Image (tube, rainbow, N blue to C red):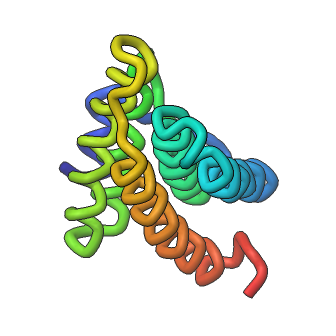
């Protein structure tokens, strides 16, 4: 699915590019990684959820940098699809993992306490760190973050 398809489908919308919004969203992602690392042993469910949120915020930062934002109630899905459309096949594996994390996070937050192990939370944090590194590189290359 292309960015144009997402736009035609009404799940993303154009907005003026705002460098501050790009940077702020990426800073939230970095904050969330740090927080998830601190919580992983004490509360794997929340550490997992916060690592997921770091990925979400980094994806939103990428969207903002290209002049888009998600629309509607389930904004997590358009962010996932946008990242894949924007960065291409090189992130397909990460996008699939992100989508699985989204489902697991939903269960951990809304359905079952204790559903995430420390190992799963640590794996989520590692995935999130890799994802942020990729997004950070892209944002630096496009002049939104300092090199």
Tally of numbered discs: 0
Q: Is residue 90 visible?
A: yes
Q: Residue at x 36, y 62 (%)?
A: 86
Q: Is residue 118 left or right of residue 141?
A: left
Q: Residue at x 34, y 49 (%)?
A: 120
Question: In the image, residue 8 lies at what x, y percent?
Answer: 29, 34
Quadrant in which the C terminus appears = bottom right
Question: In the image, residue 29 lies at what x, y percent?
Answer: 64, 52
Front one among 59 and 10: 59
Q: Is residue 46 left or right of residue 117?
A: right
Q: Is residue 53 left or right of residue 10?
A: right
Q: Residue at x 42, y 35 (%)?
A: 12
Q: Is residue 72 visible?
A: no
Front one among 145 and 29: 29
Front one among 106 and 56: 106
Quadrant assignment, res 26: bottom right
């Amino acid at each position: 699915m292309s960015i144009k398809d997402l736009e035609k489908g009404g799940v993303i919308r154009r907005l003026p590019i705002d460098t501050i919004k790009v940077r702020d969203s990426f800073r939230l992602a970095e904050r969330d990684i740090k927080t998830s690392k601190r919580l992983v042993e004490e509360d794997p469910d929340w550490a997992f959820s916060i690592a997921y949120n770091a990925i979400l915020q980094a994806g939103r930062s990428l969207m903002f940098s290209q002049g888009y934002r998600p629309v509607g109630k389930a904004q997590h899905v358009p962010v996932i699809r946008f990242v894949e459309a924007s960065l291409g096949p090189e992130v397909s594996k990460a996008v699939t993992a992100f989508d699985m994390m989204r489902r697991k996070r939903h269960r951990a937050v809304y359905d079952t306490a204790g559903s995430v192990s420390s190992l799963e939370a640590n794996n989520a944090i590692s995935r999130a760190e890799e994802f942020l590194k990729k997004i950070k590189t892209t944002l630096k290359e496009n002049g939104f973050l300092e090199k």
